Image (cartoon, coloured by chain):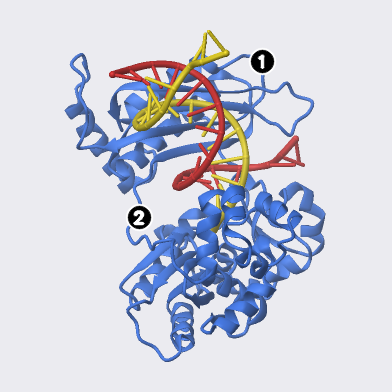
Chain colours: A blue, B red, C yellow
Amino acid sequence: MIALVDCNNFYVSCERLFCPSLEGKPVVVLSNNDGCVIARSDEAKAIGIEMGAPAFMMDRLLTENKVAVFSSNYTLYGSLSDRVVKTLQAFVENLEVYSIDEAFLDLTTMVYEDFTELASTLRQTVKSNVGIPVTVGIAKTKTLAKMANRYAKKHMKAAGVFYMDTDDKVKQVLSLTGVGDVWGVGKQYEKLLIRNGFKTALDLVNAPEEWIRKNMSVVGQRLLTELKGIPCIEMEETAAIKKAICTARSFGELLSSKEDVRQATANQASRCAEKLRKQKSCCKLIQVFLQTNVHRQQDKQYFRSINLDLPVATNSSAELIFYAMKGLDRIYKEGYNFKKSGVLVTNLVPENELQMSMFDKRDREKDKRLMGALDKVNFRFGKDLVRFAVQGYSEKWKLRQARLSPCYTTRLEDLLTIKD
DNA sequence: TCTGGGGTCCTAGGACCC
DNA sequence: TCTGGGGTCCTAGGACCC
C-alpha cells in the first residue's frame, strides 16, 4: 500500500499558523510578483475566487469579502514543509517528497489490519507537531492513492483520511471521479477522452489499451495500469539529480533600459550557478531568454532565446554571468518594454567528472575556492551580500511582494512576539 | 498599472553515420 | 523501372505535474 499525505491549502495554512485570527476567514496567497492567486482557503474558494486568477481582476471580490491577501513567502513554506516531512519520516522507512506540500509513504512493509488507524495517527501527529492540517489517502498505487486523497478531501472532510481497501470501494470511487481529475490527465487529454465517451475514471479503466497507447502514448498506458491497481510508477526516495535548472522572473515593472535587464539577467545566472553548486553539478549549455508582456496588446512584442555551448562545463557564477551577458548582448533589442528574462542551464554533469579542455586558460581551482567562499559568506550573512558588479543594486527588476509575511521560522528578527 | 515559476517525460522529424 | 536499412543524436513541441 501507498499513502499520499497532502497538506490542506498549504500556503494558506502556513500563513494562518502564525495568524490564528484568520482561521475560518477567507485567505489567499499570490504567486511571485503578486500576479495570480495560487492558494485559497476553503472560505475563499466558496466565494468564487478561482485558482490562477489574476489578482488585479479579483480586486473587488477580495475587498468586498475582506479576504486576507499574502505575497508568497517560500522561505516560510519551505521551512514548514521540512517539519512536516521530518514528522512523517518517524513513521515509515521509505518516503518520497513529491512536492512542497505532498509526500508518498511506502507502506508495503507495514502490517496493519486497517490502515485507517495509521492514517489518522499521521494526521493528528502532523497537526500537533507542526500545526498544519493534512489529508491522507491510502491505496495500492500512487495514482489510486492520489485519488483516495482527493476523495477524502471532497467527501470525508471531517475525518481527513481514506483507505481504499476493497475492489468495490475502488470501483465506487473510480465511478465518482471525473476523468479530468485523475492524476496525469490534464486539460488536453480530458477533452480528448470526453470526446471519445470516457467520462469517469471507471470508463477510463475499461478503455481499450491499444486506443490509450495510440492516443496517450506510454504515459497513458502506465496510468491505466496504475488505475487497475498494478503499481508502475516507482517510489523515488532520494531526490533525483535535476537535468535542467532554470531561473526566470517577471520584472517588478516593465524594463526598457538594457542596463536594468543586464542586472536582472546577471542575477538569474548567479542564482543558477548557486543551484548548480548545491547539487554538485556543472552545466555545458546555457540558455538566455527575454520577452515582452504578451498581455499588453498596445506594446510591440518580442521573444528571443539563445543557447551558448560552454567550452568546459562550469558552475562558477563569474563564468556563467559572463556567458549570460554575452548571450543577452546577442538577443537584446532596443525599443521594447521587457517583462521577463530567464537563464536555463542544462547538459549537466557531476562536478567531479569534468572533461577538461587543452586550450582552457581559466584557473578552475581558484574559481572553485572563490565560489566556496562566496557561498559561505552569503549563507551566513544573507543572500547576495557578496555579488558581482554587474548584478547591481537596482530595485526596478525586483519582484513585487507588497504583502509578504515575516519569515517566522528562519529569521531571528522575525520571531513572533506574543506579548510586548 | 496589474496575468507565476520550475520542473519532467515523450514523440516526431531531421541530420548524420556506416 | 529501379533508388537500403539500421542506428544515434539533437531539437522542437506538446503533454503533464505542483
Q: Quadrant of residue A309?
A: top left
- Residue for point 78% across, 52% down: A59
Q: In the rendered view, would you say A361 is above or below A299? A: above
Q: In the rendered view, would you say A193 is above or below A385? A: below
- Residue for point 45% across, 58% down: A78
Instruction: Identify the residue under disc 1.
Output: A335
- Residue for point 34% across, 72% down: A89
Q: Chain of mark 1?
A: A
Residue A212's x, y, as percent? 60, 54
Q: Quadrant of residue A118?
A: bottom left
Residue A3's x, y, as percent? 46, 74
Pair 2/1: label in front:
2
Nearer to the camera, C5 or A171: C5
Hey, what amino acid is under mark 1?
Gly
Label 2 vs label 1: CA separation? 43 Å
Instruction: Identify the residue under disc 2.
Output: A239
Residue A409, can we see it? no
| Element type where label 1 sits in the image | loop
Residue A255, can we see it? yes
Hey, what amino acid is under mark 2?
Ala
The reply, left or right, for residue A91 in relation to residue A201 is left
Residue A365's x, y, as percent? 17, 29
- Residue for point 49% across, 76% down: A139
| Element type where label 2 sits in the image | loop
Q: Chain of mark 2?
A: A
- Crowding at dot 1, Cα within 10 Å, few <14 / some 14-19 / many 20+, comes out as few
State which tag comes first along the sequence, 2 or 1. 2
The reply, left or right, for residue A3 in relation to residue A320 is right
